[in-house]
Amino acid sequence: MSRSISDGRSWRQRCARLTAVAGAIAMVTACGDEGTTGPNAGRLGITITGLPAGVAGAVTITGPGGFQFVTGSSRELAALDPGSYTITAADVTGGGVRYTATPATQAVLVTAGALATATPITYAIRSVQFDLAVHLVAEGFTAPVFLGAPDHDARLFVVERNGRIRIIKNGTVLDAPFLDIRSRVNFAGERGMLSMAFDPQYDVNGSFYVYYVDLMGGMVVERFNSTPGSDVAGASAGTVIAFPHGGENHHGGLIEFGPDGMLFVAPGDGGCCGDPQNNAQNPATLLGKVLRIDVRTAPYVVPPDNPFVNSPGTRPEIWALGLRNPWRFSFDAETAMLYIGDVGQDMREEINIASASAGGLNYGWRLMEGTACYNPTSSCNPGGQLVLPAHQYLHSEGCSVTGGYVYRGTAIPELTGHYLYADYCRGWLRSFRATSGGVADEHQSWAGVTLPGTVSFGRDGAGELYMIAGTRVWRIVRQ
Ligand SMILES: [Ca+2]
């Protein structure tokens, strides 16, 4: 699959052609001026090797005057303005195999009347020659269920499902909890305090949010104010949003701010079996959805660009629908993508990927479980409107997906951009990297990690990732 937009002619010819086709002034600007001819023109030779037939490279050459050219194969560029040119070679995929280029970037000086030659770009199959492991960070927690930290904060905040937040500081669990609202949290079965999120302005306002099941069985997002950097939370600033649930399971469990600064909340479908109330497809309830609200003011407001603000009968807080128990979701700010691990019914565990700005998507439940019809058992997606998972696995491989994060830390550079997830029963750790189109690619199974009972991942202030199982918190490291 070629990503090249070149046609073998000089860049000046290509620009003229594209301009004629597109009729766009912008394209003329993007191409720079009319180029250089005669004795003042320079040339640049590009060599691309290592790819099998039918797989094109992805090499971008930029230079003076807004010059830009993309090629998938070796070629010589002519009629170039003298100056410094930057050559960037991106990874490509062919036949399910990813190829990485060396050098990935280089600068070449083009001089008048001469041929400059770039260092040959060699593609090779990307290989992983290491494994991951986990190192114990701390233990002895009561039903730890989540871990987070403000950006660039060295502390780790561990949410205990009974209603406390504990701090790990300099490798030690502090005696005094950061927060203790056990008297208000329904801690039984799957219920409890399930996650927390730091305000995007935490370093200024010290605010954070918790998501829990209250004593009446309802779902609550509550805001607390504190002094930034303090090891003890301040007073409650009140309920942000609350809504009934009443079921014994499928509360969802995560709250997180998106790259847009809005708070996302993902409640489960209300519990039981097969979503008997059909909540996930019911636009009048918040259950089985992803919600998006603006909490910069109290009470919260619905962002005007939410997808259903003008749809009568649909709760305007709804960002996405058709979810069963989106226990863990996360944003990858780098690519502005949303990953949702949706726990399946009896057959299929799934991970969904979408642009963080794509509202109104229907992820299918209870019409579908993963890629299969559920209820009804056939003709469940006649219009093709439902969003199918980017990845699923069957219950022959596990029982319940624990969604994780895209790795953006610095300790394991090879893992950068890869999404990690686990299975609660089997305790395996796997990863994939999503293409820009949201397709799961480069699947890896990390044999060095087996942690049955992995209930959640965590992410610290530097982007390193953690796994939580039993009473323990583990850090994911390179083996
Ligand atoms: Ca689905």
Image (tube, grey):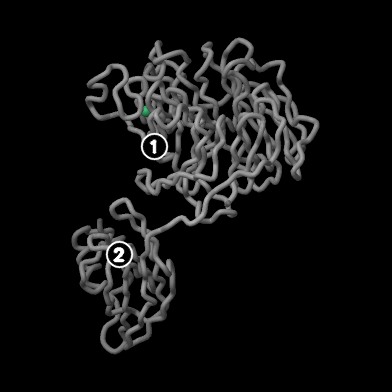
In front: mark 2 or mark 1?
2
Q: What residue type is labelled 1?
A: Ala
Q: Residue at x 52, y 34 (%)?
A: 427
Asked if the residues shown at circle 2 and circle 1 are in contact, with their CB atoms under 8 angstroms apart, the answer is: no
Residue at coordinates 44% horizontally, 16% vertically from top-left?
A: 285
Q: Say above or below: 209 vs 312.
A: below
Give amino acid for label 2: Leu
Q: Is residue 11 visible?
A: yes
* Viewer-proximal residue among 228 and 4: 4
Q: How far apart are marks 2 and 1 (CA)?
A: 35 Å
Q: Position of residue 218 (x, y in %)?
A: 57, 14
User: Which comes before the other along the chain, label 2 or label 1?
Assistant: 2
In the rendered image, residue 288, in percent from the top left (x then y), is placed at 44, 21
Judging depth in this view, the residue of 315 and 71 nearest the camera is 71
Pointer 2 residue: 51
The number of numbered badges drawn on the structure is 2
Examine the rendering and report whether any part of residue 244 can be seen.
no
Neighbour class for label 2 at 10 Å: few (<14), some, many (≥20)? Answer: many
**Residue at 44% in and 75% down:** 107
Q: Is residue 328 left or right of residue 39?
A: right
Kindly tell me whether mark 1's CB lies below 8 Å from ligand 1.
no
Give coordinates of residue 262: x percent, y percent. 52, 35
Label 1: element kind: loop
State which image quarter holds ligand 1. top left
Residue found at the far right of this picture: 175
Pointer 1 residue: 358
| x, y percent for residue 39 | 29, 89
Q: Considering the image in quadrants, where does the N terminus appear?
A: bottom left
- Tag 2, which secondary structure? loop
| Residue at x-position 31% and y-position 63% | 57
